[in-house]
Amino acid sequence: MRIGYARVSTEDQKLDLQLQALRQGGCGKIFSDHGISGREFDRPGLDEVLRALEPGDTLVVWRLDRLGRSLMHLVQLMDDLGARGVHFHSLTENIDTGSSGGRLLFHMIAALAEFERTLISERTRAGMAAARERGQRLGRPPGLDAEQLRDAIAAVRERGEYMGDVALRYQVTRRSLRRMIQHAE
């Protein structure tokens, strides 16, 4: 059985185009989410369609982006469907995992996405290393300036004040204060 899934991100958008395409694509049942972003983890329509799918069924979507939060999520979902004996068909991209060519195309897209993520990660690490070499500080600014930190260290070590009281006075967490004191040593 061909079972469709449609989704629009906002309440203002309409499902009509997707529903029509899914019906024309031979879907006997169609599940949908209306006004739910693809980034949301809680998508009742998607959960329903995944429960309804049985071995030999085909999950049909209008476009790939209607199904997954990210390409990584799509790959994971495809692996889960494949393990359950369920096929997948994206009408717009004409990817049908019921055929060997469709499976190959999907895995090629996934491999390219993984390659792109790796390149982005490498560029990010290289940029951070270059910034450190230039003396730039990375990350969030410290919760205390140098003078406040000296006073906090003196309060804890010399005056014997409780770490929690000192942290409260400077409006930082006890854990953050402890970490700043350790890094100051």
Image (tube, helix red, strand yellow):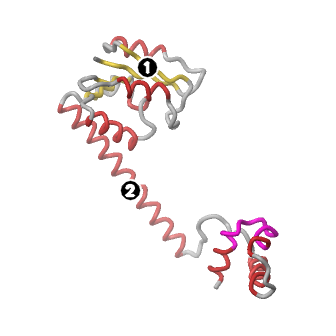
Query: Counting other residues with Cα less than 10 Å from the Cα at mark 1, is it few (<14), some (14-19), or many (20 or more)?
Result: some
Question: Is-magenta flag for residue 106?
Answer: no
Check disc 1 and give the amino acid type: Phe
Q: State the image coordinates of residue 131 (x, y, percent, origin top left).
A: 54, 70
Query: Spatial distance from mark 1 to mark 2, Cα to Cα?
Result: 36 Å
Q: Main secondary structure of the magenta part?
A: helix
**First of labels 1, 2 by sequence position:** 1
Task: Measuring from the top left, give residue 164's x and y in whole percent.
Answer: 75, 71
- Disc tally is 2
At horizontal 61% and vertical 71% (from top left) the residue drawn is 137
Residues 157 and 79: in front is: 157
**Could you tell me which quadrant the N terminus lies in?**
top left
Residue 8 in the image: state x and y as whole percent.
Answer: 51, 24
Q: Quadrant of residue 155?
A: bottom right
- Residue 80 drawn at (x, y percent): 31, 37
Label 2: which residue?
Answer: 119
Label number found at residue 31: 1
Tell me which residue sits at (64%, 85%) in the image. 185
Judged from the image, the secondary structure of the residue bearing numbered disc 1 is strand
Q: Is residue 164 above or below residue 82?
A: below
Residue flagged by tag 2: what amino acid is it? Leu
Is 120 situated left or right of 169 in this image? Answer: left
